[in-house]
Image (cartoon, helix red, strand yellow):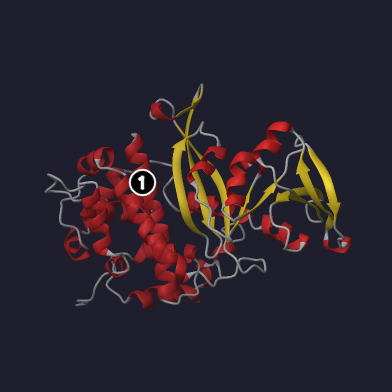
Amino acid sequence: MNSGRTVFSQVLDHLPWYEFQKCVARYRGDYQQKNFSCWDQFLAMSFAQLTYRESLRDIEACLRSMSGKLYHVGFRGRVARTTLADTNESRDWRIYADFAQVLIRIARPLYARDPIGVELDQSLYALDSTTIDLCLSLFAWARFRKHKAAVKMHTLLDLHGNIPTFIRITEGRVHDVNILDEILPEAGAFYVMDRGYIDFERLYVFTLCTAFFVVRTKENILLQRRYSHPVDPSTGVRSDHTVILTAIDSAKAYPDPLRRVSYFDAETRQRLKFLTNNFVLPALTIAQIYKCRWQVELFFKWIKQHLRIKAFYGTSENAVKTQIWIAVSVYVLVAIVRKRLGLEASLYQILQVLSVTLFEKTPILRALQASDSESDLLDVGNQLILFDF
């Protein structure tokens, strides 16, 4: 008889229990809750993420089939779908949002030396959002359009390891540019954004904080060229200009010069123009930095494919945010496990192995290292090989 610990229990060893309790105490999450604690809720929802459960009934049935092992994993309360539904509806989602930030602070140093696809000594962040469609009749609080409901997941992604450093979940009608008000720029870091984030008053905050931005410009922005700099057309760079804004409101909001780089992408046959407040890096590097923005799009695609953030177990705003934040926590936890154990497998491969071995009593390294050599677990072309480092 194998008396070892389950894989699930070994994965949970990488969670900072004391920090979790601090988050619970901050919002009094366990106040007058004796039968089903915040930890029980987190374990049940994490189990659902790792094993791709479809519903609360599915979660209940699967966990009850493992009833003999639940106590040793950490469950103390009885898992019932009604109890889980009630806690998702009523227990403060900020508990899990704060805990996700704790895990992010642990994960980022582990990936600080990972390559980002461009020669850059400074930190590089990509900012974007993804829309998660909802049924209006069930999620009336998230009205987006006349016959549609949605929430937006605004994310600032650290491209060293693709770790989300800032996440804000809003109604679908909140414009992307408003999120710039909630971001405190890091001095010396680069922020890459699409043209939906062009607001010169907000972008000037980056300059005042000695941070740099690279954003794709719009055709209707009025600019006047002040200086032209030499370029090498063979690299794809077509022009490199120092410019100033000429529209009265724009010039008042951003009085300093800007740099406009024009680049021809041979693969897509598109000519792209970027604005930045950095005048030191080569023009080609500015274009390469913007190209890295695509990684945040791949991040959104990846979590929608491999985590449960498109179909929800509850319909209230609290339940939706709780589920998304626990999904983010699971993503970051798996990233931490991968780095601490020195695994070569991608996050996708690790999740696939965990989904079928979670309650097996085997050393976690034996279970996960096997995935490095299993050809049947290799990602197909559209499964984000981005996460294979």
Q: Position of residue 27 (x, y in %)?
A: 24, 46
Residue 199 appears in view = no
Q: Is residue 105 left or right of residue 194?
A: left
Residue 2 screen position, x and y as percent:
22, 77
Q: Quadrant of the N terminus?
A: bottom left
In the foreground, 45 or 216: 216
Above or below, 149 against 1 in this view is above
Q: Residue at x 27, y 56 (%)?
A: 43
Up the image or down, 384 lies above or below 5; here it is above
Q: How many marks?
A: 1
Q: Type of residue at label 1?
A: Gln
Quadrant occupied by the C terminus:
bottom right
Q: Residue at x 62, y 60 (%)?
A: 381
- Percent across and percent down for residue 4 are 23, 76
Q: Would residue 388 be visible to someone looking at this image? A: yes
The foreground one among 380 and 78 is 78
In the picture, measured across the screen, residue 95 lies left or right of residue 171, that is left
Find disc 1 in the rendering and name its residue: 323
Given residues 246 and 314, the one toward you in this image is 246
Horizontal side, residue 345 vs residue 98: left or right: right
Label 1, residues with CA under 10 Å away: few <14, some 14-19, many ≥20: many
Residue located farthest toward the top when viewing the structure as drawn: 146
Task: Identify the residue at horizontal 45%, vertical 37% (top origin).
Answer: 170
Q: Is residue 244 above or below residue 71?
A: above
Q: Is residue 244 left or right of residue 126?
A: right
Q: Residue at x 24, y 50 (%)?
A: 26
Secondary structure of the residue carrying numbered label 1: helix
Q: Where does the image place residue 251, in percent across and percent down from the top left?
A: 71, 38
